[in-house]
């Protein structure tokens, strides 16, 4: 999909201007266009683009893609992952069945953009930067008048979905963001002749609740296998320990049994990339007194502990789009009731549950105890598997009742 310059669109009018063409912004645009709105999508980068990402889609993302009718297409270009291996701080190995989908972030972005119903005169995709003064609270802009002053473009409503901007080895956030709820991750790609069929996660005592990961990407034309390798940790943990993640990742790959095996049978194919993860949940339903909404990573929808970001970002874009409607007079109105409000409540509740998980796994000894119980109890293993796939509450496996049953089943 061709991006035009913002300068070429000066003087135009739109129902909604969306700043940020990632999963949240593109999903929001897709649903708004299906409802008949005129939408302008703006991003500072030219697509397709590369962005630091784990490249693995979990159950939330897959459900959102299925809603859009894109899951089958993505499955045809992605790699199905049938399970996950988790290693506790003391080395207890847990193997769990599951269903994940590995796909390069650039491929996902391209598919999401290509699915947007681009009707002439009703959709625009622009390349450029929106410069505006910080608004109140966590919003990067106060109202749509700033878009008109900055770009000469009129709109009835604006959606801020810019998330975090990245560059190789560094990352900064766009707009003001709260000081808590931050994590940092580094990743790079490694190509090897060895085939690892499932996700690999190792909990490092120094990083916890952070972890080291090896995620299979795809088989290359030459017959080798590409892997996304990286590690991440909450910012407070890194500051407390005085750690540099780039150094930690190098040590993990070289000393971990699986990491060293991949390195011995291959080599790196990309430079190191880093990024800030925002898990400080600030998502709010669009208010009757505001004509700006903030969605996706910019509003902290990324889940704590697992750092699953794409699914919740897409969900937030869908919910905000569903809260907007065109009145008979042509004005855009906001509905805070119905499925939209319910969706916001569900997202907030899930986010709180993952926050509890993050606190639980901040204690290495508790993680080791839980890992041993999972290995010894088929009941507990089944509950963990169901939680990972979204069939049970995220915290179901750490509830006292579940842990008590694991002593006998």
Image: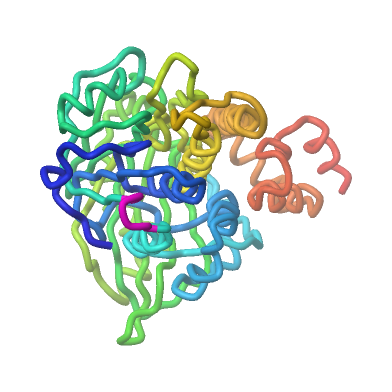
State left or right for residue 50 relative to residue 296: left
User: In the image, 236: left or right of 9?
Assistant: right
Residue furthest out toward the front: 329
Question: Taking 132 as reference, is 408 above or below it?
Answer: below
Where residue 235 appears, as percent x and y from the top left, is 34, 29
Part of the protein shown in magenta: 118-123
Q: Residue at x 60, y 32 (%)?
A: 340
Image coords of residue 29 (percent x, y): 41, 46
Q: Nearer the viewer, residue 20 or 338?
A: 338
Q: Residue furthest left?
A: 7
Quarter that holds the N terminus: bottom left
- Residue 251 lies left or right of residue 345; in this view the side is left
- Residue 86 in view: no
**Magenta segment, prevailing SS (helix, strand or loop):** loop
Residue 338 seen from this side: yes
Q: Residue furthest bottom?
A: 222
Q: Position of residue 303 (x, y in %)?
A: 50, 37
Residue toward you, 23 or 230: 23
Residue positioned 16% across, 24% down in the render:
149
88 over 96 or under it: above or below? above
Q: Where's residue 161, x and y in %?
A: 35, 37
Q: Nearer the viewer, residue 79 or 237?
A: 79
């Amino acid at each position: 999909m061709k991006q035009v310059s913002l300068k070429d669109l000066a003087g135009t009018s739109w129902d909604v201007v969306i700043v940020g063409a990632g999963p949240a912004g593109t999903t929001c645009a897709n649903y708004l266009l299906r409802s008949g709105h005129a939408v302008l999508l703006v991003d500072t980068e030219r697509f397709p683009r590369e962005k630091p990402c784990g490249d693995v889609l979990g159950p939330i993302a897959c459900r959102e893609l299925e809603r859009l009718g894109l899951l089958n297409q993505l499955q045809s270009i992605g790699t199905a992952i049938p399970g996950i291996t988790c290693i506790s701080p003391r080395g207890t190995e847990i193997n769990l069945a599951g269903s994940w989908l590995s796909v390069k972030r650039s491929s996902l972005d391209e598919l999401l953009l290509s699915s947007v119903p681009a009707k002439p005169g009703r959709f625009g995709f622009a390349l450029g930067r929106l410069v505006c003064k910080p608004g109140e609270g966590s919003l990067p802009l106060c109202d749509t008048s700033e878009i008109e002053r900055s770009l000469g473009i009129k709109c009835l409503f604006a959606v801020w979905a810019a998330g975090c901007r990245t560059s190789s080895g560094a990352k900064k956030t766009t707009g003001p963001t709260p000081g808590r709820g931050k994590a940092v991750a580094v990743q790079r790609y490694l190509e090897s002749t060895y085939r690892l069929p499932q996700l690999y996660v190792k909990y490092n005592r120094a990083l916890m609740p952070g972890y080291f990961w090896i995620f299979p990407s795809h088989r290359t034309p030459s017959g080798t296998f590409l892997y996304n390798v990286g590690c991440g940790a909450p910012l407070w943990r890194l500051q407390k320990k005085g750690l540099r993640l780039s150094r930690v990742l190098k040590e993990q790959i070289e000393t971990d049994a699986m990491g060293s095996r991949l390195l011995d049978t291959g080599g790196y194919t990309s430079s190191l990339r880093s990024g800030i993860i925002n898990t400080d949940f600030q998502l709010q339903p669009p208010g009757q007194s505001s004509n700006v909404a903030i969605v996706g990573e910019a509003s902290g929808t990324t889940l704590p502990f697992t750092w699953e970001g794409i699914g919740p970002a897409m969900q937030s874009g869908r919910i905000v789009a569903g809260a907007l409607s065109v009145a008979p007079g042509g004005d855009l109105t906001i509905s805070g009731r119905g499925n939209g409000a319910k969706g916001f409540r569900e997202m907030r509740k899930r986010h709180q549950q993952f926050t509890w998980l993050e606190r639980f796994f901040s204690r290495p000894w508790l993680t080791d105890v839980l890992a041993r119980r999972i290995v010894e109890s088929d009941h507990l293993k089944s509950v963990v598997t169901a939680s990972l796939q979204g069939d049970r509450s995220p915290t179901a496996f750490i509830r006292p009742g579940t842990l008590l049953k694991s002593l006998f089943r």
